[in-house]
Amino acid sequence: MPRWKAMKTKKAAKKRFKITATGKIMRMGAGKRHLLSHRSTKQKRRLGRNTVSETHKHHIEASLPFSHRG
C-alpha cells in the first residue's frame, strides 16, 4: 500500500507571494527590473506591491499550505 504523501510548500510560490496579516496575497508588479531611469517615481511605486485577484487566490493558497492566517 502506498504511503501518504505529506503536504509541501511550492518553493516557486513562496518566493513570489506574501500573505498579509489580513489574508490578502501580495505580489510584485511586472516591469520593475531594469530601464527604470525614465519612469516616474509614482509609476515605480505603483509597480511595487499589488494584491492578487480573488479569481486566482485559491490556486496560490493551495501552493502555500502553511501560510494561511487564522
Image (cartoon, rainbow, N blue to C red):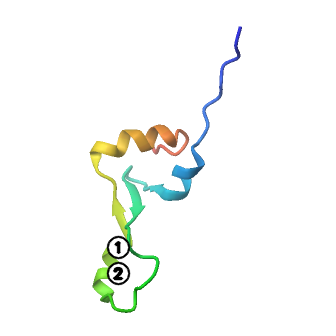
Name which residue type carries label 2: Lys
Residue at 41 percent across and 85 percent down: it is 35
Q: Residues within 10 Å of mark 2 (few under 14, many from 20)?
A: some
- Could you give the CA–CA distance between mark 2 and mark 1, rounded to whole angstroms? 5 Å
| Quadrant of the rendered image containing residue 1 | top right
Name which residue type carries label 1: Leu
Which mark identifies residue 6? none
Residue found farthest to the top? 1
Residue at 55 percent across and 41 percent down: it is 66
Residue found farthest to the bottom? 37
> Relative to residue 64, is residue 24 drawn left or right?
left
Above or below for 5 versus 59:
above
Mark 1 secondary-structure assignment: loop
Residue 25 visible (yes or no): yes
> Relative to residue 55, is residue 58 drawn left or right?
right
Above or below for 52 versus 67:
below
Q: Residue 27, image x and y in percent?
A: 41, 60
> Relative to residue 28, is residue 4 drawn left or right?
right
Which mark identifies residue 47? 1
Residue carrying label 2:
44
Q: Residue 26, image x and y in percent?
A: 40, 59
The reply to whether discs 2 and 1 touch (Cβ–Cβ < 8 Å) is yes
Residue at 44 percent across and 41 percent down: it is 61
Residue 70 visible (yes or no): no
Above or below for 28 versus 59:
below
